[in-house]
Image (spheres, rainbow, N blue to C red):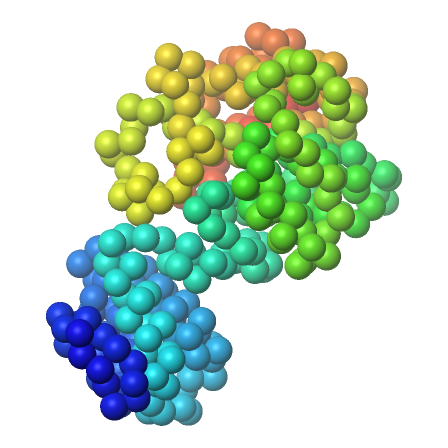
Amino acid sequence: MTRGVSGVIYPANVKYLSLLMTIHESRRLLIEKITPIYDSNEASSIADLVIEHITGLDRKSRIGVGNDSLSASQLDQLQKAIARLIKQEPVQYILHESWFCGLKFYVDKNVLIPRPETEELVEWIISNLKFPLRKLKILDIGSGSGCIPITLKRKIRKADIWSCDINEAALLVARRNANTLGADVNFLLLDFLQTSERNGLPVFDIIVSNPPYIPEKDKMKMHSNVVDYEPHTALFVRDNDPLVFYKAIATFGKTSLSPTGHIFLEIHEDYSAAVQELFLSAGYLSVEIKKDMQGKDRMVKVGHHL
């Protein structure tokens, strides 16, 4: 171990941290260390997030003070962040924050990191609302960080929003975010695949979910920063039943979706046709597949009427 003049102790093999490192230098170093793992654009974005978190300065604010040196405490934070990033741990878990629809959410290993595709799902729901708004009852299945129900509550103040999850640890994160962001959401500990548990829920005008939909066989194709760190129960389903959650939602919606209501779901791009056929076979008359910004079939809207 080596001790710097500031008193901060560094491992002997960490020779790249200078006690006089400037903000600009720290950003360049960070990019250099993680570029073998991430492409240049992503490495640059990650570096900006880390440096902003450490210094409290966004990119614009750093322009005039980029040659200021980091403090001993900030250097320590930088060292720890680099060590975790090199192991491909997602930056959102390191910083315990992730942005979604302009809101900052607390995240940890118990919840998925919110994705841009899910933002598109939320925006699709909002764009389908008819004004003036009446009182709406909305159910989100699979709370995770709470990004979907909390954002909907912030955007649709008149809505009565419920959200359920099988994981108590995830619900603690969701409730924390709801409290921080001032969103009144009714969170429930509930296994949605158990008919007896979901049958106690009321009728809803909107049902929304980003359920687990990745077959376990696809693990080998996925990046380590996802497979090694994000919760598998929120990602993967059995290979022999990849549509298990869609089947449960289709069954539930037959009795618990209002006659004029809609179901909005995120889907696996390879199973869009299968999801469409599932809901049509269940008796739903309206099934619309929507592509995301990457041109992939990633969302579906389902209703009782054409």
Q: Which residue is depicted at the point 55% across and 15% down?
A: 247
Quadrant of the snapshot with the N terminus: bottom left
Front-lying residue, 234 or 270: 234
Front residue of this view, candidates 102 and 112: 112
Q: Quadrant of residue 24?
A: bottom left
The image shows residue 256 at horizontal and vertical percentages of 74, 19
Residue at the image point whose x is 28% and y is 37% from the top: 222
Residue 135: quadrant of the picture: top right
The location of residue 121, given as percent across then percent down, is: 57, 40
Residue placed most toward the observer, 223 or 292 = 223
Q: Residue at x 33, y 75 (%)?
A: 76
- Residue 139's spot in the image, x, y percent? 69, 32
Total numbered labels placed on residues in the image = 0
Q: Is residue 2 left or right of residue 59?
A: left
Q: Is residue 136 visible?
A: yes
Q: Quadrant of the C terminus?
A: top right
Q: Quadrant of residue 279?
A: top right
Tell me where residue 298 appears, x and y as whole percent.
47, 34
Left or right, residue 145 beside residue 67: right
Compared with 139, 89 (above or below) is below
Query: In the image, what residue occupies the spot 25% across and 54% down?
Result: 87
Please indicate whether residue 202 sits to the left or right of residue 84 in the image.
right
Give above or below for 69 relative to 85: below
Q: Is residue 105 above or below residue 62?
A: above
Q: Is residue 304 visible?
A: no
Whether residue 81 sits left or right of residue 156 in the image: it is left
Q: Nearer the viewer, residue 202 or 204?
A: 202
